C-alpha cells in the first residue's frame, strides 16, 4: 500500500499543485508573521539592552523622581544610594523633550543627560568630540544626517510649555538656550530614537536650565570587587516600597525586553496571525475539493484494491498518508517562502528611519515549526472527509462503469435545519447587540451567524448560481453549458465559491465598517469642532505673527479667516476648583485666555454655534466651568481691565482653552489685547489631504514664534489617515485569502476538465470550437467568482452594520451606517477578471485534446 500510495502521488503531482499552492501561501503567511515579530523582538533587545548594560545596577521608579527638598525626596534618595558601600557613582538618567530650531525650521527633539562617567555612555562617538562646556551638546547621528546637522552647527532649544504648579514655578516665558553641536553619536535603533526625531545629549546643568529635571532611573556604577547582588539587596531593603525597583543592569535589560517586546510581539501576532488562520481556512476548501475529486476518480482503483485484499482501514490510511505527505512538503516550502518574504519586507524597512532595526532576521525554532505544524493540521483535517468517502468504496464498484463526474447527494434536512437555526439565532443576537451597544454579544452573534451561513452554502450558492446563470444564456451555447456545469455538483460549487465569499466578505465588511466609522466620526467632529482651523501660539496667550494670517489666507483650501483679539487673566485657586486635599494657598493662580471676535466674523468661520455669541454673554467650554468656579447661566464679573462688566455664562464648544466674548465687550473692559488666535473655514467639509499638508508645513516652518494648528480639519485628517491606513493594511492581508480562493477556482476547473474529458470531446465533435470551449470554462469561472463575491459583499455589509453599530454605541459615538457603493462595486467587478484569469490554464488544457483521441479513451 505504501508503494502504491507513493506511485499515485507521483502520478498526480500536477493535480495536487493547486492544493499545494494554497498550503504554501497560507503557511507562508504564518511563517512570515512569526519571523517578522521575532525580528522585532530581537531588535527590541538591542534597543533596551544597550543603555541598561552600561550600568552595574539600575534603580527605577514607577513614577518620575521629581525635584523637592523633603526627607525621602529624590535628592535624599540619590544621596543614600551614593553613600551605600560598594557604589562608586550614581547618575540619574534625566530625559525630556524640547522644541528645537535650526535652518529656519522647528522640530521636537528628545533630551537626555550626558553622563560625566565615560563608561555610562553606551553609544559611540561618530564625529567631532564630546562637550567641553555648558553650551555644547552631542546629537544622534542618524537624525542629524537626515536634518543636515554637522559638528559646529548651532541649534536653539526651547522648553516645552508646562502649567505652573506652584507660585514659585511661574516663569515669565519658557527658557531658551542656543547651543553648539560638538559631535555626533551613533546610538543605532534604541528606545530613544523616535523615528527621525533627533536625540540631544546635554550636560545636566543645561538640562536644568531648560526645566528638564525629571528622571525614572538611576544608573549605578560599583567599585572594583563590589558584589552587585549584595548592593541590589541592600538598596532593595533601603527602598522597601512598591514604587521602587532595584535590579542589576542585565536584569533590567531582560525585564524591559520582556515588558516592551513581549507585549508588542504578542499584540502584533494577535493582529496578524488571525489573517494567517483565515488564509489556511480558505486553503482547506481547496484541499477538500482536490482530494474529493482525486478519490472519486480513483474509485475503481480502490475497488480493485479491495478485491485483492486491501481493507477499508488501509484505503483510509493510504489517503491520509498521501495528504500528510503533501502537507509536509508544501508546508516546508511555505515556511521557506515566508522566511524569504520576511527578508524582502524587512530589507527596505532597515533602510528607513524606523525605530526598530530590521537589519537581521529573528528566525526562531518556533517560527519554523509552528507554520509546518499548522499546515499539516489543516491538510489532515481537510482530508478526513475525502478519505472517509474513499474507504467506503465497495469491491463490486470495480465491475461497474464510473460516470465522468460523480454528483454529490442533495443537502440533508438536518443540516438545513441546523444551519437555519444558527443563522437566525446569530442574526437575532447581532441585531440586539447593535441596538443595545453590546460588542461582546455582537461578536458571539456574528460567529454563530457565520457558522450557520457556511453550513447553508451548499443550498445557497447553487440557488444563486442558477439565478445568475440565466444571464449567461445571452452568450449562446457556451453560456448555457457554463451555467449548467457550475451547479452540477452542489458541494463542489459551494466550497469553491465559499472560499472566495469568506475573503470578499471580510474585505466588504472592513470597507463598510471603515466608511461607517468615518462617517460617524466626522459627524462627531463637526459637532465638537465647529471651526475648521484654529491657529494659536505654543506659548499660552502669545501673539500670532501677522505673516501667519497672510500665509493662511494664501493656502488653497482656505475660504475665509478671522482674527481674534485676546488677553490673559488669572483666577485664584479655591477649594471649589481644586481636588480634595490640595492646599489652595500653595497653588499658583490659574491662567486663562479671553478671546474676542465680531459675531458677523464668527458666523463666517464657524459651521454652527455662532448665534450663541451675543453682547453680554461669555462662551466657555463645559470642562472649564469648575476651574473657573462658574455654573451655566451665572452672571459673572470677569477679572479683565476695570472688571466692571457682568456677563451671562453660556456653555459652548466654540472655544476649548479659554473664554469667548464679542470683540466690543472685550474692548469695553479696557484690557490690553493682541492677536491671540486665527480661525479659518475651509472651502469644503471633507478631508483635504493637500490642505492638511499645507497646514502642517505652516506649523512646522514657524520657527520664530512656534504655533499650533488645530480644529476640525486636523482632527478629520487624523481619523481619515488612521482608517485609510488600517483599510489598506488589512485589505492587503486579506488579499492572501482571496488569492487562495481564486487558486481554488482554477483548481476546481482544472479537475473538472480532467473529469469531463469525454464530454468535452463530444462537444468538440458536435461542432463546439476551441474558442467556445475556452469561453465555456471562462464563463463558468466568472459565474463561480461572481456568486462568491456578491454573496461575500452582501453578507459582509450586513455583518459590518451589526458590528459597527455595537462598537460605535459602546464607545459613545453616534451610530451612522454608510454603504460605500463605489468601492463595493469595484470589488464585485474585480471578480470578472479574476474568474477569467483562473480559467486560462484549465481552458487551454481542455482545448488541446483532439475529439477523436478523447472519444477513444476508456
Image (cartoon, helix red, strand yellow):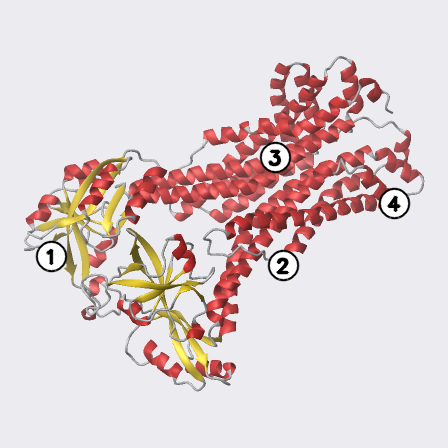
Q: Give the x, y percent position of residue 738.
A: 59, 37
Distance CA(mark 2)–CA(mark 1): 67 Å
From the image, state whether disc 2 or disc 4 is nearer to you: 2
Q: Name the residue carrying label 2.
A: 364
SS for dot 1: loop
SS for dot 2: loop
Is there a contact, CB below 8 Å, between mark 4 and mark 1? no
Q: Name the residue carrying label 1.
A: 639
Q: Give the x, y percent position of residue 274.
A: 58, 48
Q: Residue furthest bottom?
A: 85
As drawn, is 450 to the left or to the right of 287? left
* Sequence-first tag of 2 and 1: 2
Q: Name the residue carrying label 3.
A: 500
On the image, which quarter does residue 766 sit in?
A: top right
Q: Residues within 10 Å of mark 1 (few under 14, many from 20)?
A: some
Decide which of 384, 664 is in the foreground and name it: 664
* Sequence-first tag of 4 and 1: 4
Q: Give the x, y percent position of residue 819.
A: 45, 32
* Sequence-first tag of 2 and 3: 2
Amino acid at each position: 500500500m505504501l508503494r502504491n500510495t507513493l506511485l499515485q502521488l507521483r502520478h498526480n503531482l500536477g493535480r495536487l499543485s493547486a492544493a499545494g499552492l494554497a498550503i504554501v501561501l497560507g503557511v507562508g503567511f504564518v511563517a512570515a508573521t512569526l519571523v517578522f515579530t521575532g525580528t522585532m523582538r530581537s531588535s527590541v533587545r538591542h534597543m533596551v539592552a544597550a543603555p541598561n548594560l552600561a550600568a552595574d545596577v539600575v534603580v527605577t521608579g514607577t513614577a518620575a523622581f521629581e525635584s523637592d527638598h523633603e526627607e525621602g525626596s529624590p535628592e535624599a534618595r540619590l544621596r543614600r544610594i551614593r553613600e551605600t558601600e560598594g557604589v562608586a557613582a550614581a547618575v540619574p538618567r534625566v530625559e525630556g523633550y524640547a522644541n528645537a530650531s535650526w535652518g529656519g525650521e522647528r522640530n521636537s527633539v528628545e533630551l537626555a543627560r550626558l553622563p560625566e562617567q565615560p563608561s555610562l555612555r553606551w553609544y559611540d562617538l561618530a564625529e567631532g568630540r564630546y562637550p567641553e562646556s555648558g553650551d555644547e551638546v552631542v546629537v544622534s547621528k542618524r537624525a542629524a544626517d537626515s536634518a543636515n546637522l554637522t559638528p559646529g552647527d548651532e541649534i536653539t532649544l526651547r522648553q516645552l510649555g508646562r502649567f505652573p504648579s506652584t507660585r514659585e514655578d511661574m516663569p515669565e516665558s519658557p527658557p531658551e538656550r542656543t547651543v553648539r553641536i560638538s559631535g555626533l553619536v551613533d546610538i543605532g535603533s534604541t528606545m530613544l530614537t523616535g523615528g527621525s526625531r533627533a536625540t540631544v545629549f546635554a550636560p545636566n546643568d543645561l538640562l536644568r536650565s531648560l526645566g528638564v529635571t525629571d528622571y525614572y532611573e538611576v544608573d549605578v556604577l560599583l567599585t572594583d570587587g563590589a558584589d552587585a547582588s549584595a548592593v541590589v539587596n541592600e538598596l532593595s531593603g533601603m527602598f522597601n516600597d512598591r514604587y521602587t525597583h532595584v535590579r542589576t543592569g542585565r536584569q533590567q535589560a531582560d525585564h524591559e525586553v520582556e515588558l516592551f517586546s513581549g507585549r508588542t510581539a504578542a499584540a502584533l501576532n494577535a493582529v496578524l496571525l488571525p489573517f494567517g488562520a483565515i488564509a489556511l481556512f480558505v486553503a482547506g476548501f481547496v484541499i477538500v475539493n482536490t482530494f474529493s475529486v482525486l478519490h472519486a476518480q480513483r474509485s475503481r482503483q480502490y475497488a480493485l484494491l479491495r478485491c485483492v485484499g486491501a481493507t477499508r482501514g488501509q484505503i483510509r490510511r493510504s489517503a491520509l498518508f498521501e495528504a500528510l505527505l503533501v502537507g509536509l512538503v508544501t508546508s516546508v516550502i511555505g515556511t521557506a517562502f515566508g522566511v524569504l518574504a520576511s527578508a524582502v519586507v524587512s530589507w527596505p524597512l532597515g533602510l528607513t528611519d524606523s525605530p526598530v532595526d530590521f537589519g537581521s532576521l529573528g528566525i526562531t525554532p518556533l517560527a519554523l515549526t509552528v507554520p509546518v505544524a499548522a499546515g499539516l493540521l489543516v491538510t489532515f483535517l481537510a482530508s478526513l472527509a475525502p478519505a472517509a468517502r474513499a474507504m467506503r468504496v465497495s469491491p463490486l464498484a470495480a465491475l461497474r462503469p464510473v460516470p465522468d463526474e460523480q454528483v454529490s447527494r442533495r443537502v440533508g434536512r438536518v443540516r438545513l435545519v441546523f444551519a437555519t437555526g444558527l443563522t437566525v439565532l446569530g442574526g437575532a443576537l447581532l441585531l440586539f447587540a447593535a441596538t443595545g451597544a453590546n460588542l461582546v454579544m455582537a461578536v458571539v452573534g456574528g460567529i454563530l451567524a457565520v457558522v450557520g451561513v457556511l453550513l447553508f452554502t451548499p443550498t445557497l450558492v447553487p440557488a444563486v448560481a442558477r439565478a445568475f446563470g440565466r444571464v449567461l444564456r445571452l452568450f449562446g451555447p457556451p453560456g448555457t453549458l457554463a451555467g449548467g456545469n457550475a451547479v452540477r455538483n452542489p458541494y463542489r460549487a459551494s466550497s469553491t465559491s465559499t472560499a472566495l465569499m469568506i475573503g470578499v466578505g471580510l474585505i466588504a465588511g472592513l470597507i463598510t465598517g471603515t466608511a461607517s466609522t468615518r462617517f460617524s466620526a466626522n459627524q462627531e467632529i463637526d459637532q465638537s469642532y465647529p471651526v475648521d482651523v484654529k491657529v494659536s501660539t505654543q506659548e499660552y496667550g502669545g501673539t500670532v505673527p501677522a505673516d501667519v494670517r497672510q500665509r493662511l489666507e494664501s493656502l488653497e483650501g482656505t475660504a475665509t479667516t478671522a482674527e481674534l483679539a485676546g488677553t490673559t487673566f488669572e483666577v485664584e485657586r479655591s477649594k471649589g476648583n481644586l481636588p480634595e486635599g490640595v492646599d489652595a494657598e500653595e497653588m499658583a493662580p490659574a491662567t486663562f485666555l479671553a478671546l474676542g471676535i465680531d459675531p458677523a466674523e464668527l458666523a463666517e468661520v464657524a459651521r454652527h454655534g455662532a448665534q450663541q455669541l451675543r453682547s453680554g454673554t461669555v462662551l466657555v467650554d463645559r470642562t472649564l466651568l469648575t476651574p473657573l468656579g462658574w455654573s451655566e447661566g451665572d452672571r459673572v464679573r470677569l477679572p479683565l481691565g476695570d472688571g466692571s462688566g457682568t456677563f451671562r455664562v453660556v456653555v459652548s464648544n466654540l472655544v476649548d482653552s479659554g473664554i469667548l466674548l464679542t470683540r466690543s465687550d472685550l474692548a469695553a473692559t479696557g484690557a490690553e489685547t493682541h492677536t491671540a488666535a486665527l480661525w479659518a473655514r475651509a472651502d469644503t467639509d471633507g478631508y483635504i489631504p493637500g490642505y492638511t499638508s499645507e497646514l502642517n508645513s505652516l506649523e512646522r516652518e514657524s520657527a520664530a514664534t512656534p504655533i499650533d494648528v488645530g480644529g476640525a480639519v486636523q482632527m478629520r485628517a487624523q481619523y481619515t489617515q488612521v482608517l485609510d491606513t488600517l483599510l489598506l493594511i488589512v485589505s492587503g492581508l486579506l488579499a492572501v485569502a482571496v488569492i487562495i480562493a481564486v487558486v481554488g477556482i482554477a483548481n476546481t476547473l482544472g479537475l473538472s476538465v480532467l473529469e469531463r474529458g469525454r464530454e468535452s470531446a463530444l462537444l468538440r465533435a458536435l461542432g463546439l470550437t476551441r474558442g467556445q470551449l475556452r469561453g465555456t470554462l471562462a464563463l463558468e469561472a466568472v459565474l463561480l467568482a461572481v456568486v462568491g463575491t456578491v454573496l461575500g459583499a452582501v453578507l459582509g455589509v450586513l455583518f459590518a452594520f451589526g458590528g459597527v453599530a455595537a462598537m460605535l454605541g459602546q464607545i459613545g459615538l453616534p451610530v451612522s451606517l454608510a454603504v460605500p457603493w463605489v468601492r463595493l462595486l469595484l470589488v464585485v467587478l474585480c471578480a470578472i477578471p479574476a474568474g477569467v484569469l483562473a480559467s486560462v490554464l484549465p481552458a487551454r488544457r481542455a482545448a488541446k485534446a483532439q475529439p477523436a483521441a478523447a472519444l477513444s479513451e476508456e
